[in-house]
Image (cartoon, helix red, strand yellow):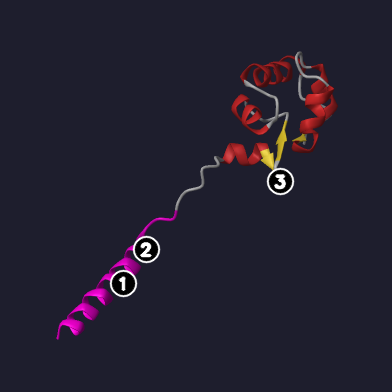
Amino acid sequence: MYKKSLAILLLSCAVSLTANAATTEPAKSSTAPAEQVQQVEGQINLNTADVATLEAGLLGIGPAKAQAIVDHRNSNGPFASVDELLEVKGIGPATLEKNRDKLSVN
C-alpha cells in the first residue's frame, strides 16, 4: 500500500511539474530590437551603434572612446568605411585592427 501511494504521489508531482513547464512563458531575449539592427551577424555598425554597444562590443574601447566615436559621427556624418575610425581622436591602427572584423558601416 505504501509503495502504491508513493508511486501515485511521485506521478502527480511529475505531471504537475510538466504542466507548470508548459504554461511558463519562455524567457525573453535580452537583446533589444535596436541592438539587433546595430549588430548584424555579429558586426557592430559604426553608423547606428550607441555608446553602450560600442563600449561592450569592441576591444580597447571604453566609455570615453565610444562617446568620441558617436560624437565624430554626429559632427561629420556617417562613416563611409571602417578605416575612417582612425579619424576619431584616441583610436589608432592597433585598436582598429583588433576590431576590424567586428565592424561594419552598412
* Disc 3 residue type (three-letter): Glu
Chain-order first, disc 2 or disc 3: 2
> Where the N terminus falls, by quadrant?
bottom left
Which residue is identified by label 2? 21
Specify the quadrant of the image occupied by residue 57: top right
Q: Residue at x 73, y 20 (%)?
A: 73
Query: Residue 96: percent from the left, percent from the top?
Result: 80, 27
Q: Which mark is residue 14?
A: 1
* Labelled disc at residue 84: none
In the rendered view, does 28 fall on the left or right side of 56? left
Quadrant of residue 63 in the image?
Answer: top right
Residue at image position (27%, 77%) is: 11
Which residue is at 63% across, 27% downward? 55
Helix or strand or loop: what does disc 1 sit on? helix
Please give left or right for residue 13 compared with residue 91 in the image.
Answer: left
Q: Which residues are magenta?
A: 1-26
Within 10 Å of disc 1 (Cα), the crowding (few <14, some 14-19, many 20+) is few
Secondary structure of residue under mark 3: loop
Does 54 appear above or below 37?
above
Residue 17, image x, y percentages: 32, 66
Q: What is the distance, in whole Å, between disc 1 and disc 2 at their CAs?
A: 11 Å
Q: Secondary structure at mark 2?
A: helix
4 in magenta: yes
In the foreground, 12 or 79: 12
Q: Which quarter of the rendering shows the C terminus? A: top right
* Cα separation between marks 3 and 1: 40 Å
- The circle drawn on residue 41 is 3
Q: Quadrant of residue 53?
A: top right
- Label 2 is placed on what type of residue? Ala
Above-or-below relation of 45 to 21: above
What kind of residue is marked 1? Ala
Give the Cα distance between marks 2 and 3: 32 Å
